[in-house]
Image (cartoon, rainbow, N blue to C red):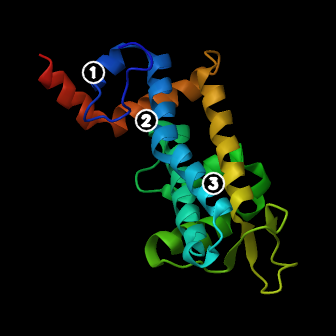
Amino acid sequence: MAEGKWRYLPDYDNMAKLISSGDDEIIRWVEGRVNKMLIIPLKRIRKIFNRSTEMSGLKHVGLCITTVVLCASESFGRFLEGEGARRGVGRQCFKSFIKTYMPNLKRYQNILWNGYRNCLAHGFRIARGRIRTSIGCLYITPENSEMGVLEIELWNFFTEFTHAVERYFKELRDPTNICLRRKFIDSFKSLYSYWIGFWNRKTR
């Protein structure tokens, strides 16, 4: 299938044909899917947020965006770690992506995992942390926070994440990054195995 014809939905796109199209096309498909389902919608929310004259209705949007970005970071870590990642160990995948592609936050990876990601995903809360807007920096350290917690600036955090995603896909597109690409492809085939099998059966 020619580039630009994908819908980036495994139940609509012929995944068997995608697999046979080669590694570069698989990378393009995943990047397109990430942009369609994650990056573009969040950028649209940001525009609405910035244009809004009534902020009270959007005051909780930071928790929504932060939850999505942190869980997405764990997902990217799954591709980064490959099939060698131990089953059920999201911490390993999450930290791998943060350390490799968001090094400005490497120092606080434990707080981000335990206090942010886990607490938001399992309890709709943040422990030892706080989401802020318009503080002019990526974060305020616990030592400098009036509450003694790590304070993350929402939109700088989102920008940091988008840059990390761009860098990851840029490295994936480089054919000399053999190990990185192999882990990505192996993970893709494992994670999308149901749909690959579905399309193989359907097109026989």
> Is there CB contact under 8 Å for labels 2 and 3?
no
Q: What crowding class fits label 3: few (fewer than 14 Cα within 10 Å), some (14-19), or many (20 or more)?
A: few
The Cα atoms of the two marked residues, 1 and 2, are separated by 16 Å
- The amino acid pointed to by label 1 is Ala
The amino acid type of the residue labelled 3 equals Lys
Q: Is residue 120 rendered to the left or right of residue 154?
A: left
Q: Is residue 108 left or right of residue 27?
A: right
Kindly give the residue lying farthest to the bottom in the view shown. Answer: 147
* Residue receiving disc 2: 187
Amino acid on which the number 2 mark rests in the picture: Ser
Q: Earlier in the sequence, mark 1 or mark 3?
A: 1
Q: Is any atom of residue 93 visible in this view?
A: no
Q: Position of residue 64 (x, y in %)?
A: 52, 66
Can residue 195 be seen in the rendering of this structure?
yes
Q: Residues within 10 Å of mark 1 (few under 14, many from 20)?
A: some
The C terminus lies in quadrant: top left
Q: Closest to the observer: 1 or 201?
A: 1
* Percent coordinates x, y for residue 42 in the rendering: 56, 52
Quadrant hosting residue 95: bottom right
CA–CA distance between discs 1 and 3?
37 Å
Kindly identify which residue carries mark 1.
16
Would you say 148 lies left or right of 15 here? right
Element under label 1?
A: helix
Quickly name the residue at label 3: 47
- Secondary structure under the numbered disc 2 in the rendered image: helix
Q: Nearer the viewer, mark 2 or mark 3?
A: 3
Residue at x 29% of width, y 25% of height: 15
The residue depicted at 24 percent of the width and 37 percent of the height is 194
Instruction: Assess whether mark 2 and mark 1 are in contact (beta carbons under 8 angstroms).
Output: no
